[in-house]
Amino acid sequence: MRDEANLTFSHDLDAVSSDDGMRFQREKFCPRIERTKNFLEVPVDDARVLDIGIGYGSFLSILEKDYGVQELFGMDPFPKSLEMSRKNTNADLRHGDIEDKKWPFSKPFDLITCFDVVEHLKKPSMFFTRSGRYLKPNGLVLVTTPNKTLAYHMRKLPFIGKPDTNPTHINVRVPEYWRKLAIGTGYEILDEWMGEHMTHVKFFPSVLGAALTNIGLDPRNVFGLNHFQQSFCLLIRKS
């Protein structure tokens, strides 16, 4: 099952929802949840969470099943994506677009997440300004986007690079752009890191990353090597 209208979808729902697929999703999302827990005003299982651009619903499913979060909400502009995600999660999923003047929610959130979405927006600042309206006092925003450092540019190299073939990536930016945008729209930066998977370049980073993991080091925390991570992650709070 696929959403043909959503060009960001590259996998079948059954593959994503399989045991191997969910193992990959946990490797991707659980470190983000663990870091965010340190800054939440409430225990994570008491948090009211909104995920923007829900993908396959995997993140909401992990919050629900692994962390016991009950007040879970999602928003997405693609009806088929909402339909697919309802097979993965019991979260309250609603149709809506970041650019809408009013989002379909009346109560504020402890945490708003947005994974690999802002690089698709003509005006990424709109996400930050809109989100601020739906946060509780001291509420958090966790946003991730492709990590445009040296390794990202290496994707264009023949044989070793993994090209970015997504035509909707119209605003892939360097980390400093996102830091300035967050601060300029009234947030303070609580934490940032480069994480997920080393997917920009073939062979060497993955082999070295596996070797470091085997000796107990996290490649995401090794300076230099962490620039090969797929995502730049930014945790912010309305100041």
Image (cartoon, rainbow, N blue to C red):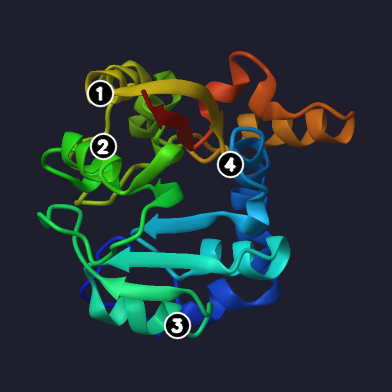
Q: In which quadrant will I find the N terminus?
A: bottom left
Answer yes or no: is residue 160 visible: no
Badge 4: residue crowd in 10 Å (few <14, some 14–19, many ≥20):
some
The percent coordinates of residue 225 (x first, y second) are: 61, 21
Q: Is residue 41 left or right of residue 238?
A: right
In the displayed structure, 194 sits above or below 55; it is above
Question: Which residue is disc 2 drawn over?
Answer: 128
Residue lying at 23% horizontally and 25% vertically, measured from the top left = 185
Mark 3 touching mark 4, by CB under 8 A? no
How many numbered badges does the structure rendering display? 4
- Assign a secondary structure to mark 1: helix
The percent coordinates of residue 192 (x first, y second) are: 51, 24
Q: Quadrant of residue 215?
A: top right
Q: Amino acid at mark 2?
A: Phe
Q: Amino acid at mark 4?
A: His
Quote the CA–CA distance across marks 1 and 2.
Answer: 8 Å
Answer yes or no: is residue 22 visible: yes
Badge 2: residue crowd in 10 Å (few <14, some 14–19, many ≥20):
many
Question: Which residue is disc 4 drawn over?
Answer: 197
- Assign a secondary structure to mark 3: loop
